[in-house]
Image: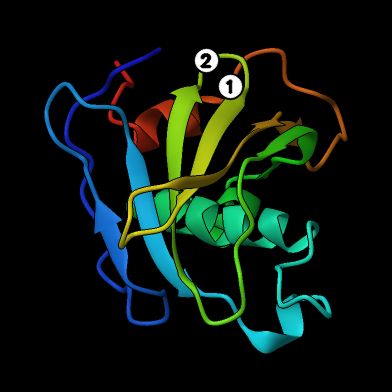
Amino acid sequence: MFYIGTIPKSPDTSTLPEVISQPMENTPVSASVTLQVPFHDVDMMCVAWHGHYVKYFEVARCALLDQIRYNYQEMKDSGYAWPVVDLKVKYVRPARFGQNIKVTCQLKEYENRLVLSYQITDPQTGQRLTKGETTQVAVNMSTGELQLVSPPVLLEKLGLAS
């Protein structure tokens, strides 16, 4: 696991759900959001449909990317796309209609790819509901070529550029 120093929070977080960030010295870069499971995300048993958990991961991932000031628009502006090439999800307990859930996204790797881990918990009980991981790779948008190392702009955003 890679540890990095303090990352400044993006100045405009007004459009995000409640964000709890932990960009402290010697701690991993992570961001958490609190969401409520809406009716349109559940099945007839009022359990969140399995595909919606990926959407919950995405909301937390966007909060983390905003925190390091490298969100999807900034990625595009820098000339790189970062498609997800691998996704893993482990369903432990169901999330249910109306339940508040805390979704935490943590940066695990950044040198050759972005590996992000996710954990969905019940903020009242602390029980883990779901965990997962995504892997994203940098692709040069002008050439379509996969980058074998993360572009310098990512390292700059993480405060690691020399």
Up-down relation of residue 152 to residue 77 (above or below) = above
In percent of the image, x 11 and y 27: which residue is there? 25
Is residue 139 toward the left or the right of residue 133 in the image? right
Is any part of residue 35 visible from this angle? Answer: yes
Work out which quarter of the rendered image holds the N terminus and state it: top left
Is there a contact, CB below 8 Å, between mark 1 and mark 2? yes
Is residue 103 toward the left or the right of residue 45 in the image? left
Of 24 and 153, which appears nearest the observer?
Answer: 24
In percent of the image, x 41 and y 74: which residue is there? 16
Up-down relation of residue 35 to residue 10 (above or below) = below
Mark 2 Cα shell of 10 Å, populated few (<14), some (14-19), many (≥20): some
Residue 88's x, y, as percent? 73, 32
Splitting the image into 4 quarters, where does residue 96 fall?
bottom right
Q: Earlier in the sequence, mark 1 or mark 2?
A: 2
Q: Residue furthest front?
A: 45
Of 149 and 97, which appears nearest the observer?
Answer: 97
**Helix, strand or loop at disc 2?**
loop
Splitting the image into 4 quarters, where does residue 42 fall?
bottom right
Disc 1 versus disc 2: distance between alpha carbons?
Answer: 5 Å
**Helix, strand or loop at disc 1?**
loop
- The residue pinned by badge 2 equals 111
Residue 92's x, y, as percent? 62, 41
Work out which quarter of the rendered image holds the C terminus and state it: top left
Is any part of residue 69 visible from this angle? Answer: no
Chosen colour scheme: rainbow
Of 67 and 102, which appears nearest the observer?
Answer: 102
Which amino acid is tagged 1? Ser
- The residue pinned by badge 1 equals 150
Which amino acid is tagged 2? Glu
